[in-house]
Image (tube, rainbow, N blue to C red):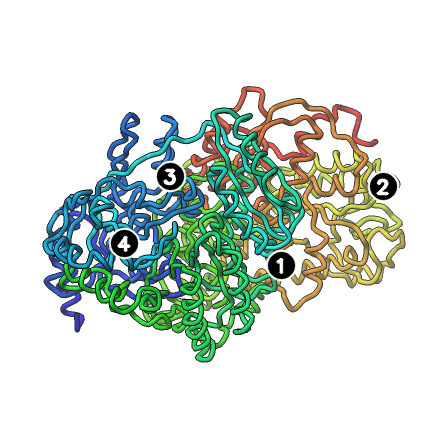
């Protein structure tokens, strides 16, 4: 393909020949430039075939034009084999079905784009499962697993994917349909003759170890191994043929499981112990060290751990087997867990390691490349010692973890892949490590394949003659070298096509501080390494990320997809108009700014911040969408309504259909939405009415005439400053009123933030102000700037936050906590404010003071006992609370009040301005249907519907006709009359 005319002809030919989508647009290409590896290659376009006929047609057209074809599943490959310069075949869109499942035969017929978890869900009711289970099971596809011969944590019990494959239907690059199986079934012409002429080499040239994935599995063609063409195809990384259908074996899943967590002093001790546990028949023997374990993880004391799972027909049987292993193991400490929920919590630590490992404890970036070498299990301890020594020689660091029972180690290493000398060291280390692995009798790849990362080094493992045989086999299957060229045979150099090479060498000018990335926006974008946890279609429990992907199923609307587009925007090769890019803008348009990725993404991508940054630059000096003015500046408009006392008039006008439609159209608001009612009396006006001005100036408002005094009935308790956020102030003052009542009932003194800044004295110090000082003071209202930040109006946000910090200086001069009732506002103050005002230390001081309602009660009224409510609860943990604030204090408060049950995860879908904006209604409603609305519908009739966020309550009311309540309202109601003070 040499010019634009030929590219257009190729696109036209594909569109004429296929029923599936053909997309040569910038966005589609940008989304597939990378997988989860260090490599980047820009394709011509992406094809989503509907069936095998489409695949055959695509191969025919591409062969005519001499354009390479790259089959792609979930794009989670770590060696670069899911990237290419030709046409990418995306099987996840259409060819993603489970065609049949036979419980009696224990088989399933699947298409290549089927996500593993969907197969597991279908098999589970029959007591069956697919044996291999990589940590990416929520988004990796069966086609990708077959292409890589994936394994997972249960391989000590159920082997690799090749062990579970019965028959494969494959299209050769020249369009021949081959049914692959045992006894030479489906072998392309010439393969049998080639293999039978090399029997001696096939019998002696492959190391005998459970995790030998490197190269082609030609030893499966030996007559004593059944001449299994399907098995030999596994692990060929899309270089021999294109899989269109597979018959796979299922295994009987144990009815009960136990997890033994064995603690050792260090990883070497754990590695040396792993092989000795295999004789007890465990399901898993997984290992990891302390440098990958969160500090809060509830693990036995030690520096490294083995996760050993056992099964049985009963919980007692599984536990007995686990306890037998504990007794047989020489451990520092141990824990046996049979509760499924607790097991899932522990397994998440292990599964997230592939992302967690991309950052060293000091924040330094670490990368794959030597992600999954494997050695004989009995040699793992010695190998790890030598591996650590080699790292030290090169001045590198890494945190090994992985499948210790199979001798397979995963590790991310802090290579410098941004500079010439760093890349040269990467190459030297790779060459020396390959020699070390071979010296220990190992395989360069033990799970993820060779790809571009290791294929160049295969001669060190197999010798030149075996590699030459690999090339001859490739020629038999693919004589035109059409499929995934540069992988496995005639490979590209391991230090070519590095995805970092195209990024700017100097930091770009940005508004946020990006403290975890050294102030470098490029480094922040580099956080996304492509493990694609954001592409998990369903994640029951507290997880939030990524609601827009779950609603649309489109890569463009996943966290990874958006990060890829931002990467290409910075590169400037494919996305050429920088911050003005419409492709990036459109991908970010459906980002709810839920911040779920900040906590749920293993590497802490914060797409909400990246979106705000992008919008800030994209609309700089330009007219913004109407919704940015209508909802981004909501505090201004509601402030005017309060000052003019026109809430009643506004509500009346909003109830008139034609007027409401005009207002929504002008404001960029979705026509399906109802305009929320503005409160007739603001929270602070209610506050002034209940509590007269304290003449001594003891109130937070310093006697400014606004009536911001201490709460009536509060005596000697600790002072807390209650933040009157925009939503509580103007739209739901009942929440603020309830909070005051509960806080005072708990013995706390409540004050509101100052509205004047006379300067000097701290809040609540009991000293008066002179009239002259008050006359020169500036009046204002505190605001977290959330609505400005979420719409990317960062200059406005900075100004608002600086005014807020000026007002809050008297509060910051005390030890008083700042209690914020709206979770999104609390999150903005705790994280966005100090990151946006990274040059103002007051922002960090205020962030440190922020407490949620439950945190304030727990920390400042520890002896208070909430009312006994004894009711079930339903609802949803606010996404910002999950991602930024944490809900541990809320859980403990609910338990103390007798509020039983779990809140759902996910995002309500309204998400501040998002769900109100024109064009977002369908996605907003779909997000609510993911977890929130089903949880409410399935709850007992007497359940309390908890929803601390105004958006969550509004979504519940508008979509389900249900009134959600803030925890403060529920507790206040339980206090009963006359108990506003202790």
Alpha carbons under labels 1 and 3: distance apart: 47 Å
State which quarter of the image contains the N terminus: bottom left
Alpha carbons under labels 4 and 3: distance apart: 20 Å
Alpha carbons under labels 1 and 4: distance apart: 55 Å
Q: Quadrant of residue 530?
A: bottom left
Q: Residues within 10 Å of mark 3 (few under 14, many from 20)?
A: many
Q: Nearer the viewer, residue 501 or 253?
A: 253
In the figure, is residue 368 to the left or right of 642?
left
Q: Earlier in the sequence, mark 3 or mark 2?
A: 3
Q: Residues within 10 Å of mark 2 (few under 14, many from 20)?
A: some
Q: Which residue is label 2 attached to?
A: 717
Q: Which residue is label 3 attached to?
A: 131
Q: Residues within 10 Å of mark 4 (few under 14, many from 20)?
A: many
Residue 977 x/y as whole percent? 76, 24
Question: Is residue 753 among what the camera can see?
Answer: yes
Q: Earlier in the sequence, mark 2 or mark 1?
A: 2
Q: Nearer the viewer, residue 504 or 220?
A: 220
Q: Which residue is label 4 attached to?
A: 217
């Amino acid at each position: 393909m040499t010019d634009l005319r030929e590219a257009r002809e190729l696109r036209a030919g594909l569109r004429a020949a296929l029923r599936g989508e053909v997309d040569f647009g910038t966005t589609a290409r940008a989304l597939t430039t990378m997988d989860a590896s260090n490599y980047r290659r820009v394709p011509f376009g992406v094809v989503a075939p509907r069936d095998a006929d489409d695949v055959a047609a695509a191969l025919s057209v591409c062969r005519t034009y001499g354009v390479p074809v790259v089959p792609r599943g979930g794009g989670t490959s770590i060696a670069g084999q899911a990237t290419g310069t030709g046409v990418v075949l995306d099987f996840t869109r259409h060819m993603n079905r489970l065609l049949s499942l036979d419980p009696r035969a224990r088989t399933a017929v699947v298409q290549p784009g089927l996500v593993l978890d969907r197969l597991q869900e279908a098999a589970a009711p029959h007591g069956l499962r697919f044996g291999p289970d990589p940590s990416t099971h929520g988004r990796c596809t069966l086609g990708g697993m077959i292409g890589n011969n994936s394994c997972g944590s249960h391989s000590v019990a159920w082997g690799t994917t090749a062990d579970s494959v019965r028959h494969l239907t494959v299209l050769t690059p020249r369009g021949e349909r081959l049914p692959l199986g045992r006894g030479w079934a489906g072998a392309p012409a010439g393969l049998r003759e080639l293999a039978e002429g090399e029997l001696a080499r096939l019998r002696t040239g492959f190391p005998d170890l459970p995790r030998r994935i490197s190269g082609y599995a030609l030893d499966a063609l030996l007559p004593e191994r059944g001449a299994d063409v399907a098995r030999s195809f596994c692990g060929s990384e899309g270089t021999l043929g294109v899989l269109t259908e597979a018959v796979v074996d299922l295994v009987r899943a144990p009815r009960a499981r136990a997890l033994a967590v064995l603690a050792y002093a260090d990883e070497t001790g754990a590695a040396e112990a792993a092989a000795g546990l295999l004789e007890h028949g465990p399901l898993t023997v997984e290992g990891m060290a302390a440098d990958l374990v969160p500090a809060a993880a509830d693990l036995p004391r030690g520096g490294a751990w083995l996760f050993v799972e056992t099964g049985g027909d009963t919980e007692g049987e599984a536990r007995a087997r686990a306890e037998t292993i504990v007794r047989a193991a020489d451990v520092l400490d141990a824990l046996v867990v049979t509760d499924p929920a607790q097991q899932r919590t522990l397994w998440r630590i292990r599964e997230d390691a592939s992302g967690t490992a991309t950052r060293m404890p000091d924040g330094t970036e670490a990368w794959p490349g030597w992600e999954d070498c494997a050695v004989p299990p009995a040699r793992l301890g010695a190998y790890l010692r030598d591996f650590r020594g080699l790292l030290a020689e090169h001045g590198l660091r890494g945190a090994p973890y992985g499948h210790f029972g199979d001798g397979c180690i995963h590790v991310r290493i802090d290579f410098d892949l941004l500079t010439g000398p760093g890349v040269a060291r990467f190459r030297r280390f790779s060459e020396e490590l390959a020699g070390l692995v071979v010296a220990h009798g190992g395989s360069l790849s033990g799970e993820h394949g060779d790809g571009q990362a290791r294929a160049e080094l295969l001669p060190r493992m197999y010798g030149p003659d075996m590699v030459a045989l690999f090339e001859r086999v490739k020629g038999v299957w693919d004589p035109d070298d059409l499929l995934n060229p540069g992988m496995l045979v005639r490979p590209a150099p391991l230090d070519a096509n590095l995805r970092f090479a195209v990024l700017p060498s100097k930091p770009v000018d940005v508004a946020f501080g990006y403290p975890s990335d050294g102030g470098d926006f490029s480094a922040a974008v580099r956080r996304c390494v492509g493990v694609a946890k954001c592409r998990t279609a369903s994640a029951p429990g507290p997880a939030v990320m990524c609601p827009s992907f779950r609603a649309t199923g489109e890569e463009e609307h996943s966290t990874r997809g958006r990060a890829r587009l931002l990467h290409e925007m910075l590169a400037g090769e494919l996305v050429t108009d920088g911050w003005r890019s419409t492709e990036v803008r459109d991908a970010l348009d459906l980002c709810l700014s839920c911040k779920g990725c900040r906590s749920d993404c293993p590497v802490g991508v914060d797409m909400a911040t990246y979106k705000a940054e992008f919008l800030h630059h994209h609309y700089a000096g330009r007219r913004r969408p109407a919704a940015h003015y209508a909802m981004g500046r909501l505090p201004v408009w509601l402030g005017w309504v309060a000052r003019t006392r026109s809430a009643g008039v506004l509500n009346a006008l909003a109830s008139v259909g034609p007027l409401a439609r005009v207002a929504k159209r002008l404001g960029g608001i979705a026509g399906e939405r109802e305009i929320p009612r503005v409160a007739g009396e603001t929270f602070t006006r209610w506050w002034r009415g209940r509590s007269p001005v304290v003449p001594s100036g003891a109130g937070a408002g310093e006697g400014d005439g606004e009536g911001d005094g201490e709460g009536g009935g509060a005596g000697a308790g600790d002072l807390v400053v209650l933040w009157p956020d925009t939503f509580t102030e103007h739209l739901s003052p009942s929440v603020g009123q309830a909070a005051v009542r509960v806080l005072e009932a708990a013995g706390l003194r409540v004050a509101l933030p100052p509205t004047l800044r006379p300067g000097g004295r701290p809040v609540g110090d009991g000293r008066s102000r002179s009239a002259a000082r008050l006359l020169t003071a500036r009046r204002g209202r505190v605001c977290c700037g959330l609505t400005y930040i979420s719409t990317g109006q960062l200059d406005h946000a900075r100004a608002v936050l600086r005014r807020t910090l000026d007002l809050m200086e008297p509060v910051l001069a005390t030890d008083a906590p700042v209690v914020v009732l709206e979770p999104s506002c609390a999150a903005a103050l705790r994280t966005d404010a100090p990151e946006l005002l990274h040059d103002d230390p007051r922002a960090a001081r205020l962030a440190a003071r922020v407490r949620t309602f439950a945190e304030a009660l727990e920390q400042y009224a520890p002896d208070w006992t909430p009312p006994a409510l004894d009711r079930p609860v339903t609802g949803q943990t606010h996404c910002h609370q999950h991602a930024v604030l944490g809900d541990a204090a809320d859980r403990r408060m609910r338990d103390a009040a007798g509020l039983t049950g779990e809140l759902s995860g996910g995002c309500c879908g309204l998400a501040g301005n998002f769900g109100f904006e024109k064009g977002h209604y369908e996605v907003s409603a779909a997000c609510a249907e993911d977890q929130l609305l089903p949880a409410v519908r399935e709850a007992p009739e007497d359940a309390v519907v908890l929803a601390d966020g105004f958006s969550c309550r509004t979504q519940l009311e508008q979509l389900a006709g249900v009134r959600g309540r803030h925890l403060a309202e529920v507790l206040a109601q339980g206090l009963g009359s006359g108990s506003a003070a202790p």
